[in-house]
Amino acid sequence: MGSFFAYILKTALCLIAYYLFYKLLLSRETFHHFNRMTLVSLMLLSFLLPMFGWAGTLIGGKDALSLQITWEGLRGQVLEDGSASSSFNPAQSILAVLILIYIGGTAFFLLRTLCAYASLIRILSKGHFETLPDGTMLLLSDDETAPFSWLRYVVVNRKDYAENGRAILMHELGHIRHRHTLDLLLTEIAVILQWFNPAVWLIRRELQVIHEYEADEAVLDGGVDPKSYQMLLIKKAAGSRLQSITNCLHQSSIKKRITMMLKKKSNPWARAKLLFAVPVAAVSVAVFATPEASALTTEISDCKVSIIFSDVQKDGQFSADEGKIVHYEATMKPAEDDSPVFTVVEQQPEFPGGEVALWEFMKNSLHYPEDALKTGTEGRVIISFIVEKDGSISSPVIEKSPHESLSKEAIRIINSMPKWKPGMQRGQVVRVKYVLPISFRLN
């Protein structure tokens, strides 16, 4: 999830840069189709550009696991004595909370869009359609719904059709001929993924205005009197419409549309301003390639949100089992070499089978120490160890522990682990320090 979140942030920066570029250089020009294609292309480029040099992390590989968030981690991994665990990283915890907020917002906007489409389908299913000569399906509605079009469907209420049917129909057919619905589908996906980014909302509004410019042009080219059509727009300025998933006559930018109808056509050479997008793209790639930006996105990419559940007790706690009482004297395996030990890497080491398998192994391997069971001792042991280049475990160290016997049992469990998948940094296998909390609880 961390890798995807880093990608989303890069995309957000690209969208902001390209929106500013379009707004400053092209938004006032009158070649509407060119502007529309430019805006759609810049939006697509914003989603594609961050993938260059980074697609392996986003698509091919797994998220790094340098931040594991359990229910304990979200509470700060506080020990029984009230002190904080050495594995607690406030910055990464804040980042994890932001990722959870992003997931919640994305789910909300996805649900909102699905509800809008459900309302659209309900409207389309209630009426009787007439097939026009060009294959367009016309629905005359008895509801006070504002005229709109979607794909090859046009919906107009009977009163509007009786009063201004020709102009309204030409307007909506203009939307259909230019395939504006495809743009709206694309922008809806962008809004769901970038709901927090003001640029994506502004880009969608700009596209909607361009759609109206093109549809207005189609009406005027069809021979409708400009003044009569402008009065129609003013008259129909108020009215409800189906969010943003359809093309609607009752758009709010009436003043802009009338001004654009009266505006002198732009010089065709103004299209050359699009060439300025090339250095903007080059700057974006250069910024993403800087060490500072790479370090930041790597840290974000290293964040993986994983809520761990145990079938023994909540919070990954392990209960005493009267059939598993043993004595154990700790023996500490030494490190295999003296090469550098990393704490944050591009790809964290992984227990065979992943996190669920790790907690299952710990649950099955734990033997509650006899003296701790007799005295009713419980608590959380924080243990660190090194995952070597060959995946073996070495140098377990007790960071915090409420009792010596629990420390010995924690070390025994760590030393009994199978080989892990080693960590990777810049394509090389490296030694990585891993911190693990083990909670001992009595039923």
Image (spheres, grey):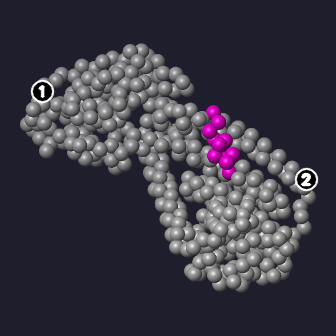
Q: Describe the element under mark 1 as helix, strand or loop.
A: loop
The residue lying furthest to the top in this view is 337
- Badge 1 crowding class, 10 Å Cα cut-off, few under 14, some 14 to 19, many 20 or more, is few
Q: Residue drawn 45% across and 26% down? A: 423
Q: Mark 2 or mark 1: which comes first in sequence?
A: 2
Residue assigned mark 2 = 269
Q: What segment carries the magenta color?
A: 43-53
The one of 126 and 355 positioned closer to us in this rendering: 126
> Is 427 placed above or below 135 here?
above
Mark closer to the observer (2, 1):
2
Left or right: residue 5 compared with residue 415: right
Q: Residue drawn 50% across and 65% down? A: 118
Q: Is residue 426 visible?
A: yes
User: Residue 50 appears in which quarter of the rendering?
Assistant: top right
Real-space Cα separation, disc 2 to disc 1, in angstroms: 85 Å
Residue 40 percent coordinates (x, y): 71, 53
**Is 52 included in the stretch rendered in magenta?**
yes
Main SS of residues in magenta: helix
Q: Residue drawn 63% across and 46% down? A: 47
